[in-house]
Image (spheres, rainbow, N blue to C red):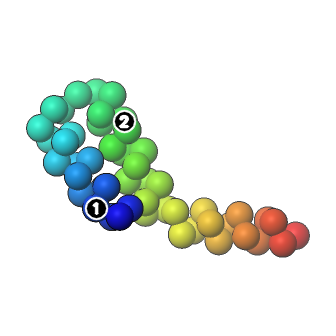
């Protein structure tokens, strides 16, 4: 579902092309792309 949300957000961004939507979309993209990495880092920090 996460990947689908990203694709949907991209389409909505292109349709509306609003500044707020743009920031949200970019933030979502980063969260989706870096999600696994951030989770791994959190796991390491939690273990320490």
The disc at residue 44 is none
- Residue 23, given in percent of the width and then of the height, sits at 36, 35
Element carrying mark 2: helix
Which of the two marks, 1 or 2, is nearer to us in this view?
1
Residue in the image at 81% along x and 66% along y: 46
Q: Among all residues in the image, which is located at the extreme front?
A: 1
- The quarter of the picture where residue 6 lies is bottom left
Q: As displayed, is residue 13 above or below residue 39?
A: above
Q: Is residue 18 left or right of residue 20?
A: left
Are the residues at dot 1 and dot 2 in contact (C-beta closer than 8 Å)?
Answer: no
Quadrant, the C terminus = bottom right
Residue to which mark 1 is pinned: 4
| Residue 43 in the image, given as x and y percentages of width and height | 73, 70
Give the answer, above or below, for where 37 lies relative to 6. Answer: below
Residue 23 has which mark?
A: 2
Instruction: Please state the total of marks drawn on the protein image.
Output: 2
Front residue (pair 26, 1): 1
Q: Look at 31% across and 55% down and name the residue there.
A: 5
Which residue is painted at 14% across and 41% down in the image?
A: 14
From the viewer's perspective, is residue 39 above or below residue 28? Answer: below
Cα distance, mark 1 to mark 2? 18 Å
Q: Find residue 12 and report its horizontal and vertical position in percent.
A: 19, 42
Q: Quadrant of the N terminus?
A: bottom left
Whole-percent x, y for residue 45 in the image? 79, 65
Secondary element under disc 1, as helix, strand or loop, is: helix
Farthest-out residue, left: 15
């Amino acid at each position: 579902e996460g990947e689908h949300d990203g694709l949907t957000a991209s389409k909505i961004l292109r349709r509306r092309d609003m500044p707020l939507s743009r920031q949200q979309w970019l933030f979502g993209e980063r969260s989706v792309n870096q999600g696994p990495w951030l989770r791994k880092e959190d796991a390491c920090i939690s273990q320490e």
